[in-house]
Image (spheres, coloured by chain):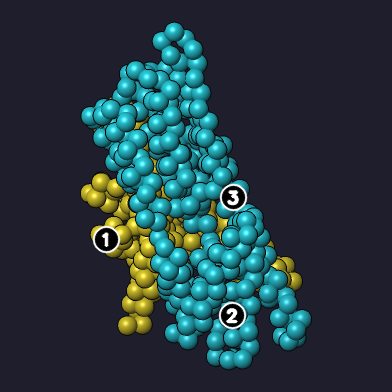
Chain colours: A yellow, B cyan
Amino acid sequence: MRILLPYLSAFSACAGYCLLFNIRGKALVASSLGGVLGWLVYTLSNPLQNDIMQYFLATVATAVYAELMARTMKKPATGFQIVALLPLVPGGGIFYTMEYCVIGNNSMFLSTGIHTLGIAGALAMGVLLVSSVVRLIHFVTTRRAW
Amino acid sequence: MNYTELLNTAADVGYLLVVNGGEIYRAEESIQRIFRAYGVTNGEVFVIPTLIEAAVSTPDGTPLTCIRRVPVRTINLDRVERVNALCRRIWNETPPIAEIRGELSRIKKRPAPSFLTQTVSFTLVAASFSLFYGGTPRDAAVALCCGFVIRLSTRFLEAYRVNSFFVNVAASFLAAAIALAAAHFDLSLSYDKIIIGALMNLVPGIAITNFMRDIIAGDIIAGILRLTESVLVATAIAIGAGIALTATRMLWGV
C-alpha cells in the first residue's frame, strides 16, 4: 500500500484536473493513467541517480503515451499531455526555493532554484523532442505540413 | 461564395479553439483548412494567445480582414475536441456555412464544469498532491480545506474583476496561511506538504506544457507570451506563500 500510494494519489490528482478541464469518461481514465505512467518511469529510472535525466525520460514517456492515446481515441494530444505531465511539475522545488529565499539562506536558494529550473528545462526538452519527432513522422508519411 | 461569412466563421472557429485552451498551431491550421476547403488559397492567419487575425482577398482583389481579441482563456478540452472534430468534417465534406454556424453555437452551449465540480476538483487535486509529495492523510485533510478556500477566494476576486496576478497572490497567501496556522496548533502536520499540494491548483501547467509546443511549431511570439504568463503566475504564487511564511515568522517567532 505504501509503495502504491504515490501512484494512487497521482491518479486522483490527475483525475481532479480532468474534471476541471472538462475531460470525461474514458479519456479521463486514459489521461490520469498517463500521469501514473510518468511517475512509474521516474521511479523505475531511479538507478540513473540523476533526477533531471529521470524527469526527462518520464516526460518523453508521457508525451509518447499522449500521442498514442490521441491516435487511438481520436482526440487532440494536448489534453492527455497536459494532464499526464502534472505530477512531474516541480511544485515542491518552486516552494522550497521560495522558502529558502524568505529564510535568507542564499546558497540553498540558488542551488534549489537552479535545480528547479533544470527540471523545468527537462520537461520542456522532453515535450520538444517528442513533438518534433511526431511532426517529422507525420510529414514523412503524409508529405503534408499538417 | 460569400467571403465575409466564410471569414467570420473561420475566425469564430479559431476563437473557440484559443479561448478554450487549444494550441496556437491548431487554431492557425484549422482556419487555413477552412479557407482551403472552400477553395480560398490566398488566406492569411496570425494567431497569438490574445489575438486572432484572419484575412482573405476576394476574386476582384478586395482585401477582407477579421480580428478577434481574446481577453481571457480558460481550459475546456471538451470544446476543443468538438471544434477539432468539426474542422475534420469541414475538410472532408465541405458542408454549407450555415450548418457550421449552427454546429458552432451548439458547441458554445455545451455545459462547462459547474462551480461545484470545480470546487470538488480543487479539493481533490490539493489533497492528492499533498499525499503525492509525501504528506500524511492528516496533511491531506488540511490541504483539502486549503483547496476549497483557494477556489472560493479566486471565485470571489474574479467576480470583482481583480487582475489574475493579484488573484494568485491572494489565493496562495490564504492557502499558505491556513496551512501554517494548522501546523502551528498541531505539530504533527508538515506545512510544506500541505502548501505544495494546495498550490498545485494554481500552477500554470497548461502554459508550461504548451509554450514549448508553440515554439517548436514556429509560433515564437505565442510561445514567449505563454512563457511570460507562466513565469508571472509562478512569481505570484511564490509571493503569496512568501508573505504568509514571513508573517507567521514575525507573529510566532518560529
| Amino acid type at image mark 1 | Gly
Vertical position of residue B137 compared to residue A13: above or below = below
Work out how far the residue at label 3 is from the one at label 2, CA to CA, in angstroms. Answer: 27 Å
Dot 1 corresponds to which residue? A25
Residue B211 at x, y percent in the picture: 50, 46
> B183 or A98, which lies in front?
B183
Residue A133 visible in rendering: no
Work out how far the residue at label 2 is from the one at label 1, CA to CA, in angstroms. Answer: 33 Å
Vertical position of residue B144 compared to residue A87: above or below = below
| Secondary structure at numbered mark 2 | helix
Name which residue lies at 35% across and 28% down. Answer: B34
| Secondary structure at numbered mark 1 | loop
Using the rendered image, report if marks 3 and 2 lie on a common chain. yes
- Say which mark, if any, is on residue B229: 3
Q: Quadrant of residue A146?
A: top left
Mark 3 vs 2: CB contact within 8 A: no
